[in-house]
Image (spheres, rainbow, N blue to C red):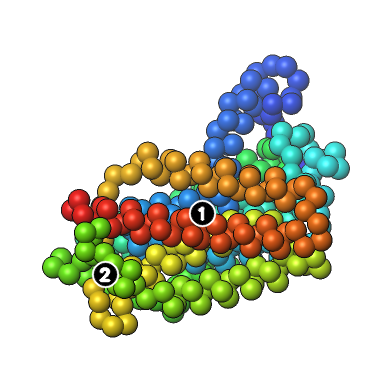
Amino acid sequence: FDDPLIRAGQYFHIRQPKGWRRSIGYVMYIMLMAISASTTIEAGVSYFFISFLLGYDIMGTYLVIQILVLAFWTQIPKRFIWRFRPYMVGRALKANSDKTSSFPSRAVTGGFVYSFSLLYSYNMEHETHDGSEFMSLGGMIGITLIISFLTSLARVNFGVHYPSDCVGGLISGAIIFAIGHAINLTHPFGCPSCMHNHCYADKDHILTLDTFSTSDLDFRPPAICALLVLVFILLVSSPKIKFWNKTAHVLGSCFSCISLKLLLLCPHPDGISKNTEINAGVIILALIIVAVNVAIGFGLHSVKARRVGRYGLMIVNSVGFLALLFSYTPLLIYWRLKQQKLE
């Protein structure tokens, strides 16, 4: 069923003969590019990072786990199963290009997981703080399926995926969401996602920039996590595996947010009070974070695209991970303490 659906999906296309179908194709291309860009790994990293900046800690924790599962689940078929993309074999017009395997569509998987996770976790956040649901489960599923369809249309229109890739991506997204949700229920990273405010300090004992001291923090849990992740990065970046070029970017960003939670948001084992929730308008900062994440992703990719030697990928990924971890984590802690001072 792929070829008829590809023809339908490319009825309006930037490479159609000159005319109204081509003109509409340009408008569609811009709109679909925006949708497709919102489903990338770089976008996913930005979603949970911004959630923690805004003080939406339930949401941020939920998204971190979902994106960790997504990142590595979807890379397995990309790494070990090869399928030529439609434009490569003349079965579709080319609008974009991608040299990785076609199956499954990670963009569609991301569209499903990101949209459902964002809506579901915000619903949890809203229910915790306001006592009511933000949206019904049916509404969340409906919006998620619409976004998944639009993402599928974008990928087929660009000529980089077959419709069957998109179906595979949708199924993969549903499985990933279920796995991520099950992991979230176990609260693997410290306290239970700060739900019901029970992991926040009361107003009389919160930490601020004025009262903060490094002795308030227990560095052992994040240090152990960082060491284990570093060993994992060295393993998957070894010459015989070379699992994924974006390993350092994803893990460095994810574990900086996990470190924030372990260091500042969860109760200290000695009973020291920690920070509390914030509500801050940081739209400009959020846009900067998105831009920085995209730049880091492309920067690391360009470095790895050059000849870096037999063990070069291991070195670049390890250094990239540590650089992100030790830059993002202090930034997040400083921001939270600074905002708390302003409360």
**Which residue is denoted by mark 1 in the rendering?**
45
Query: How many neighbours does mark 2 have within 10 angstroms: few (below 14), some (14-19), or many (20 or more)?
Result: many
Q: Is residue 112 visible?
A: no
Spot occupied by residue 221 in the image (x, y as percentages of width and height): 44, 77
Dot 1: what SS? helix
Spot occupied by residue 307 in the image (x, y as percentages of width and height): 80, 50
Spot occupied by residue 298 in the image (x, y as percentages of width and height): 63, 44
Which of the 4 quarters of the picture holds residue 314? bottom right
- In the depicted view, which residue is nearer to us: 29 or 309? 309
Of pointers 1 and 2, the one earlier in the residue sequence:
1
**Which residue is denoted by mark 2 in the rendering?**
274
* Spatial separation of the CA atoms under disc 1 and disc 2: 25 Å
Q: Is residue 135 above or below residue 274?
A: above
Identity, as a three-letter code, of the amino acid under mark 1? Val
Q: Residue furthest bottom?
A: 270
Spot occupied by residue 255 in the image (x, y as percentages of width and height): 50, 65
Residue at 50%, 61% in the rendered image: 325
Which numbered mark, 1 or 2, is in the foreground of this view? 2
Q: Is residue 157 above or below residue 113?
A: above
Q: Is residue 321 visible?
A: yes
6 lies left or right of 54: right
